[in-house]
Amino acid sequence: MPDFDLIIKQGTIVDGTRVPRFVADMGIRNGIVAQIGSLKNATADRVLDAEGLIVAPGFVDLHTHYDAQIQWDPYCTISGWHGVTSVVLGNCGFGFAPVQPEFRDRAMLTMTRTEAIPYASMKAGMLWDWVTFPEYMDSLDRIPKGVNCISYMPIAPLMTWVMGLEEAKKRDANEAETQEMQRLLHEAMDAGAHGFSVQRLGENSIQADFDGTPMVTDTMTDRLVFALADVLRERGEGNIQITQFTGDIGRGVDTMVGHGDVNPDQAFESKLAERSGAPILHNVIIPFDTVPEAHRQAVNWVEESNKRGEQIYGMTVTVRGPFTFTLEDWNLYDTAPAWNKALQGGVEERMANISDPEIRQALIQDSDDGKLAEDVLGGPISGLIIEGVNGVQELLELEGLTVGEAAEKRSQHPVETFLDLGVQTHMKAIFQTGSGVSGSPEFMKEALDSPYSIPGVSDGGAHTKFFTGGSYTTDFLTWLVRDTGKISLEEAHYKLSCLPAHAAGFRNRGILREGAPADVVVYDLENLKRVPEWGGEVVYDFPGDEWRRVQHAEGYRWIMVNGEITFEDGKCTGKTPGKLLRHGRG
């Protein structure tokens, strides 16, 4: 009988703990790292030659929305292609449990705008063999998985279950409703949930419900959040993931800096950490070229909070990449009321709205007033690149120009040109933003030098037609490690695996040590890259004949989950060794 199931020979091991890299063999048995050292006399069912390659722990993707997609895509791609071996579900307070059978369609519609997941794909691909949250966890346990996962209890479906959707949107919970939510949170955590998640982005949420109204959690009271935090305090376990921009994102990034040392949202999160006694995963910190004070202030607040004993981790957006979109689907101007209203409904309704002169004037005014969160979304409308015009002959000369350049040719306001291109192409003109994060490796290093900053916020599974953030791991290793040298390889793997695993409650994951689960990536750093490098490509691989925009990866020789190879040279093996990690264990 062989000594091991698999041996990785003579790889350069970067174990995720910041220990300096070293060359050694690794033996894997029964899904566990059984031995690291010299195994030249050992035998195995398979031996992988990793000489000249990096051997590291699989990446841990803390901010995803694969709650629907994992039911038809066991590997949670894009993330799974880029070395991610563990994901967190149920972020931002959004999810699909508990949900009554008669509310399933509305629950799916809820996710079509806020996270831009195609309704047809959810309708065709979701199993819906659960009602309660414990039943959902059992379903997640049963389905084949090519990655490991944990899940928060998302608060939006919890509030809707207890209060009803419309009531939850317009008032605070009463005492009986609050107690029932606390009971259901206990029940979810008994079933293996690891805390709860919530989005609070206010009345003009950038991630609104399908009808343009805020999500139920966007306006939930501090009192109710604290009441749920009391459950974690009572249990002495769990985490809280919270999405707040710590400022009014609709009025521009400069307001995210706050006034003085902290702003009200930051003060709330500090109090939440103290009240719950639980680690807080704060979303998000975004380094910008134009306002570096924003990330500096946010990092300083996180560090000062931790000095007081409040465990707060700053989830930091690091992936460089544009939003590539059409007005047929675009929703991320929802911070501006006029744009939110105009981009409602289907194609014909949207075209009618943006053709209306009165509505147009309101859209121009919102843009001129800086209500579109342009800093966060890759720049102003005038800077959008016109990628395609749906083959409309008289518009072909505009392809490759910015909207501002096209507007000059037409003697128009940029918003007028933007909207005209939408109408003239039946809403299929393709626009591309600049990157939504800083292109400065120095600014990115500033944000990541904090021991409490975690790279990521892939939003994997969401914004599927606009964004390819699931490639963040590959971009991080190539840009910040290999090409600019701003982050050491040892620090990178600590930040991509060990630290996020610790912060989110994964037990014994994110490191390569004897006795740890064998979640492993083996890759060629010099030849690692995203394909295509910028913007992504369209593929029709979703249920319901739907498409998405993707970036593949090159340079990963083997990706392993619990000791089994899931991808070899970019090709899927069909193995599904992933586990539901109840309470982070498994």
Image: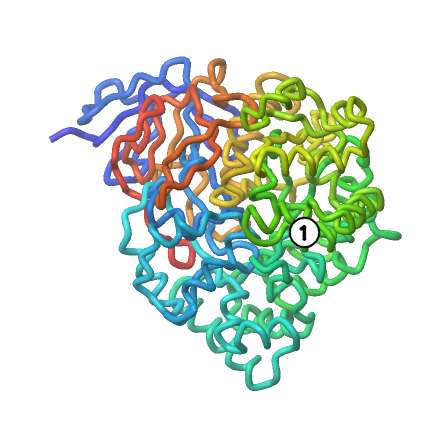
Q: Which quadrant would residue 7 be assigned to in this image?
A: top left
Task: Report the residue at 42% width, 54% height from top.
Answer: 584
Front residue of 39 and 170:
170
Task: Report the residue at 64% width, 55% height from top.
Answer: 311
**Outermost residue to the left:** 1
**Number of disc labels:** 1
Horizontal and vertical percent for residue 90?
48, 56
- Above or below residue 221? Residue 379 is above
> Looking at the image, what colour scheme do you see?
rainbow
Task: Report the residue at 73% width, 54% height from top.
Answer: 305
Instruction: Check the picture and name the quadrant holding the N terminus.
Output: top left
Disc 1 secondary structure class: helix
- Above or below residue 349? Residue 375 is above
Task: Report the residue at 51% width, 55% height from top.
Answer: 111
Horizontal and vertical percent for residue 6?
24, 28
Q: Which quadrant would residue 382 be assigned to in this image?
A: top right
Horizontal and vertical percent for residue 195?
51, 62
User: Is residue 106 found left or right of 129 in the rendered image?
Assistant: right
